[in-house]
């Protein structure tokens, strides 16, 4: 079974600084998708960024980028120029490309942003 | 924009009560999901459905059932609520064959069972 591990339950970052959240996963599949979701306090979970495993280029979305290391099965999220609104729970998730299967989530990392 | 709504943001029920949590999506998505979110445990899948009247068990289906009579609506049922079902419940939907089949989430229902 696939598993997703987020080894940092909590992290903090100074406003305007850069922070990296770690995620590793275990799978025997060669084609799959990876996601980072953000859940602000008392607000809806939203997609931050996604990556297709067959693409070597790392995905970027404005201040958010990933470091996808397929051989190491690592998928970290980098947040540049951190803002107060980035404070949230961040969940890493995996989904294999074949078949209609649900996402597998990590346990989450709570990010605090210090003004 | 995809909209996923859940019938209640907060709910307080008594042990033994039958509880219905409803989820509606407005984007004609085939897939719908129910998750439970607990501190330190992340999101755990209870059930999902890929079509009307179809359902699949997730990781923690015990004590729960689901109903999907219409494509846009997916209900989670706690037949006899217990205190260990106090939790945040999240509904999600996705389009089969959509962009990596991204899931879209509702705002969540925080259930307290006394």
Image: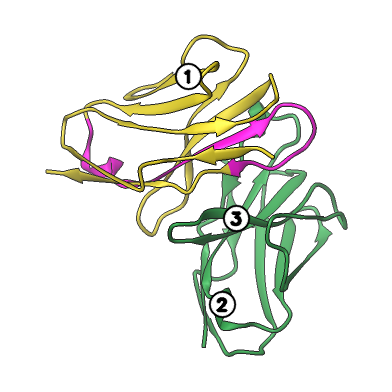
Chain identifier, green in the render = B
Looking at the image, residue A105 sits to the left or right of residue B50; the answer is left
| Relative image position of residue B42 (x, y in whole percent) | 50, 53
Name of the residue lying farthest toward the right: B53
Which colour denotes chain A?
yellow
Residues under numbered marks 1 and 3 in contact, where contact means CB atoms less than 8 Å apart: no
- Mark 1 crowdedness (10 Å alpha carbons): few <14, some 14-19, many ≥20: many
In depth, the one of B1 and B67 nearer the eye is B67
Q: Residue visible at 55% across and 53% down?
A: B43
Badge number at residue B84? 2
On the same chain, marks 1 and 2? The answer is no
- Mark 2 crowdedness (10 Å alpha carbons): few <14, some 14-19, many ≥20: few
- Mark 3 crowdedness (10 Å alpha carbons): few <14, some 14-19, many ≥20: many
- The quadrant of the image that shows the N terminus of chain B is top right
The residue that disc 3 covers is B44
The residue that disc 1 covers is A68
When the figure is inspected, residue B109 is found, relative to residue A19, above or below; the finding is below
Q: Give the structural element (helix, strand or loop) at label 1.
A: strand
Task: Give the residues in magenta.
Answer: A82-104
| Relative image position of residue A102 (x, y in whole percent) | 69, 43
Magenta stretch: includes residue A64:
no
């Amino acid at each position: 079974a696939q598993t997703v591990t987020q080894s940092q339950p909590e992290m903090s970052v100074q406003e305007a600084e850069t922070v990296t959240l770690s995620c590793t996963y275990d799978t025997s599949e060669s084609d799959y998708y990876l996601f980072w979701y953000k859940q602000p306090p008392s607000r809806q979970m939203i997609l931050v960024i996604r990556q297709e495993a067959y693409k070597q280029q790392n995905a970027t979305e404005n201040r958010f980028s990933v470091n996808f290391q397929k051989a190491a099965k690592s998928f970290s999220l980098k947040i540049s120029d951190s803002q107060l609104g980035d404070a949230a729970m961040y969940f890493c998730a995996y989904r294999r490309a074949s078949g209609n299967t649900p996402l597998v989530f990590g346990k989450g990392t709570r990010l605090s942003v210090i003004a | 924009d995809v909209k996923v709504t859940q019938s209640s943001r907060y709910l307080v029920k008594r042990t033994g009560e039958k509880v219905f949590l409803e989820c509606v999506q407005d984007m004609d998505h085939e897939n719908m999901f129910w998750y439970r979110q607990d501190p330190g445990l992340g999101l755990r899948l209870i059930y999902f459905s890929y079509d009307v009247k179809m359902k699949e068990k997730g990781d923690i289906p015990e004590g729960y059932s689901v109903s999907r009579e219409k494509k846009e609506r997916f209900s989670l049922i706690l037949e006899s609520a217990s205190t260990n079902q106090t939790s945040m419940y999240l509904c999600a939907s996705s389009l089969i064959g959509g962009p990596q089949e991204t899931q879209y989430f509702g705002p969540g229902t925080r259930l307290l069972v006394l």
